[in-house]
Amino acid sequence: MSQEYVSVNIYRSEEAVEEIPQVSEFSTERREDLRSKLLGMLDEALSLLDKIAPIPGVISEDELLEKRREGRRLRSQVSSASDQDLSKIQPQVEAYYYEIKALYDAYVKQSSQSLDELKKYGRKLVSDIRSFLSKASSLFDVSPLQKDVEDLSKKLEETNDISTVQSINHSLETLYNFSKDLSSFVDLYSSLSDDTKNSQDVKNLISEANRRISQKNYSISDLLAKLGEIAKKSQE
């Protein structure tokens, strides 16, 4: 009986020894799955942050930098966390992840509205520039400017990137100011007498303006001022 009793205990002991590693391996696998899941959430959140640009009323540049620092800090903690600490960090990671997701959704919505407004502004600039150049064409060779504005107009309609649209609008603003000055030059020129129009000084100003147009030197404020002086003297 004694031998049988001992034999049974040995068998059960061996059975228990075989099961313990299996349970341990299963727990380790689950912990590593959790770590991988949390790291994946943080990587996705950080990737979304990289797509967000500061927008007034939504988030500032400083806030974006702070969110990136927080994400990197959490990622470092998850990577080095012990098995016991990993489950404690999980709620922080999930809260951070859903906060960034919500922020990104708000950014996309705001960006869509901002994009529409920027494009509307750009289209208004294009329309005004065309009008100014139409008048200026009676005195200047504005074909290079007309080509530039049509190229920019096409790009404006084709792109949906906010930074690109902002850059296009900046170029359109430059053309707007220049074409407006050209139009003002024509208005002032039209008020001159025929003798003054045919003077060498006025012809030189027109020639210089055409030269600047061809060289994409978009400034004739000095020429406009000189024409104003000529107009004033001609009336004395």
Image (cartoon, grey):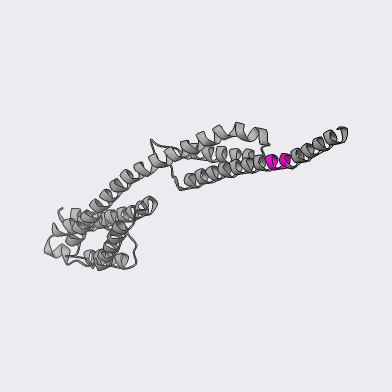
Left or right, residue 116 beside residue 33: left
Kindly indicate the quadrant of the structure image that contains residue 136. Answer: bottom left
**Residue extending farthest right:** 2
How many discs appear?
0
Q: Is residue 203 left or right of residue 75?
A: left
Along the line of sight, which residue is nearer the eye, 129 or 193?
Answer: 129
* Quadrant in the rendering for residue 176: bottom left
* Residue 9 seen by the camera: yes
Q: Residue at x 17, y 60 (%)?
A: 135
Q: What percent of the width, then of the height, locates residue 69?
A: 57, 39
> Is any atom of residue 230 visible in this view?
no
Residue 79 location, x and y as percent? 64, 42
Tell which of 209 and 3 is nearer to you.
Answer: 3
Most common secondary structure along the magenta stretch: helix
Which residue is rendered at x = 85% and y = 35% of the image? 6
Residue 54 magenta-drawn? no
Quadrant into which the N terminus falls:
top right
Q: Which residues are magenta?
A: 19-24
Question: Residue 170 at x, y = what percent?
Answer: 34, 53
